[in-house]
Amino acid sequence: MARLPILVAPDPRLKLKAQPVEKVDAPLRRLMDDMLETMYAAPGIGLAAPQVGVSKRVLVIDIAKEGEAKAPLRMANPELLWVSDEDAVYEEGCLSVPEQYADVTRPARIRLRFLDHENEIRELEADGLLATVIQHELDHLEGILFIDHLSSLKRNMILRKLSKSRKSLVGA
């Protein structure tokens, strides 16, 4: 397994819509495993392929808390089948928008279909944190960042902070 570089906003590759995969084969399983290693090292609880510069509809998630056994989810071509009318608000962050957090409102419960790491079609119902993380990662596959759910004022403030911190890193 290998750690992959994580793209940081405003990298234009983060705004591209990811392409479906034909099947989950050995190279795609390796990508999923590399993404998990990258996510754990970051540390994070979700990572979509576009965040590592791969424009494929692939994501990995693990919301297990520290001290709990890892419970990774690997998904290819995930698609929402249903969302609840009820909303939930979570403070979200993102490995591609480092050290920035904001409340985002999303459907509280979801049902989705995806290909697992063995190329089997699966369906999953989720609520709470898992539903939020899945929706956050699904957004990445559409070229949407969590900051796109914020007011333009808040979004621009965050993007300016990211640009400043990137310039100071380059100048260091």
Image: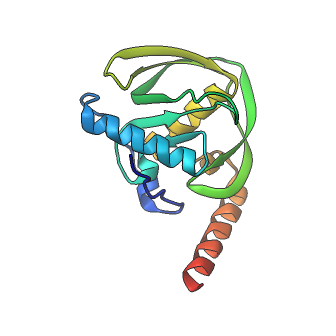
Nearer to me, 117 or 141: 117
Give the quarter of the figure containing the C terminus. Answer: bottom right
109 sits to left or right of 17: right
Q: Can residue 140 be seen in this view?
A: no
Measured as percent of width and height from the top left, residue 121 is found at 36, 15
Q: Where is residue 162 in the image (x, y as percent from the top left)?
A: 63, 67
Left or right placement of residue 115 versus residue 165 in this view: left
Q: In this view, does 104 lie above or below 130?
A: below
139 vs 10: above or below? above
58 lies above or below 168: above
In this figure, which colouring scheme has been used for the structure? rainbow
The reply to whether residue 107 is in sight is yes
Q: Residue at x 26, y 28 (%)?
A: 23
For image coordinates 43% across by 27% down, the residue present is: 78
Query: Residue 7's x, y, as percent?
Result: 48, 58
Give the residue drawn at x 39%, y 23%: 116
Query: Which residue is rendered at x = 56% and y = 50% of the image?
Result: 41
In which quarter of the view is residue 67 placed?
top right
Residue 6 on image: x %, y %: 48, 56
Q: For residue 68, which quarter of the picture?
A: top right
Residue nearer the viewer, 67 or 83: 67
Q: Using the image as rendered, state which of residue 40 and residue 102 is in the foreground.
A: 40
Relative to 148, residue 129 above or below:
above
- Residue 88 as seen in the image, left or right of residue 52: right
